[in-house]
Image (cartoon, rainbow, N blue to C red):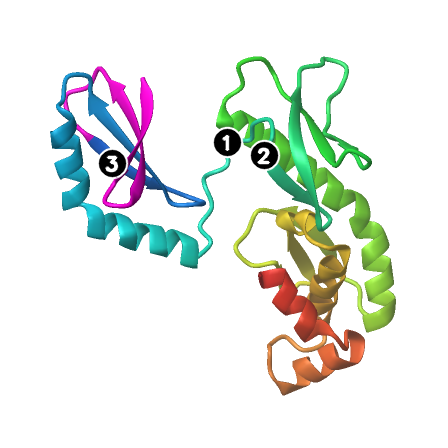
Amino acid sequence: MKEKLIIEDICILLERKNIKNMYLRVVPPKGDVKVSAPFLIPDKEITDFIKSRKNWILKKQELILNNNIQAPLKFINGEKHYLWGREYTLQLIQNNKIKHGLIDENKSLLYLPVPKRSTISKREEILVDFYRKELQNVIPQVLNKCSAIVGQKPSEVKVRKMKNWGNCRQNGKITLNLNLAKKDPKCLEYVMIHELCHLIEFNHGKKFKKLMDKFCPNWKKIKKELNE
């Protein structure tokens, strides 16, 4: 049982449930206000409750909007996801013959094969695996291009989920963030060149920045785009 109310100029989505207490949530990305309340609670009590929390609601909405906080992903039909800088609409499919995600460029759809009654974590796992394979497929070509530019080759290139976009160890091993598959391809080239430059200069000092200026002249612009 859901209804919309306007209380103190705040739009409220009220849902009455078989519960004992009242609950209030302000949810991203638009700061919608949702209230769950017991079936028999009087309207006045709900109104008084919202009035008492008005300042908190407004501060929470401001925080969400100013920081562009997004709702947690559920990996369901209609969600927007990115691949190589392009936005796609997620479409779940149940097909035993299809084992990997598929892209329809014309319709901007990302088809993701999932088992019946899949959980959020399982769907996320399948999508992460899709991104990993996408990135691994292009790494050899990008590595050859960037190695020719920098004049260095790593001992190994790995892909995993990580906080940084990439890292390079002194043994020559480079690790790339699998989320680079979501970004414009130029971002992957920038990160690859960045890590290859560490094979020459293992820090971020003046010499390193001169190498980046030489091998990737617009690296500062790409870095800014990558981190937005």
The residue mark sitting in front, 3 or 2, is: 3
- Frontmost of labels 1 and 3 is 3
Rendered location of residue 213, percent (x, y): 74, 80
Query: Viewer-proximal residue, 80 or 174?
Result: 80
- Residue 10 magenta: yes
Indicate which disc residue 79 carries: 2
Element on which disc 2 rests: loop
Residue 188 horizontal/vertical position (percent): 73, 58
The residue beneath circle 1 is: 74
Part of the protein shown in magenta: 1-22
SS at mark 1 in the image: loop
Name the dominant secondary structure of the magenta segment. strand
Residue 210, horizontal then vertical, whole percent: 71, 84
Residue shown at 73%/38% (left/top)? 133
Residue 94 to residue 72: above or below: above
Instruction: Quadrant for the C terminus, please.
Output: bottom right
Q: Quadrant of residue 172?
A: bottom right
Q: Are marks 3 and 2 in contact (CB under 8 Å)?
A: no
Near mark 1 (Cα within 10 A), the count class, few <14, some 14-19 or many ≥20, is few
Marks 3/2: CA distance? Answer: 25 Å
Residue sitting at x 83%, y 51%: 140
Q: CA distance from mark 1 to mark 2?
A: 8 Å
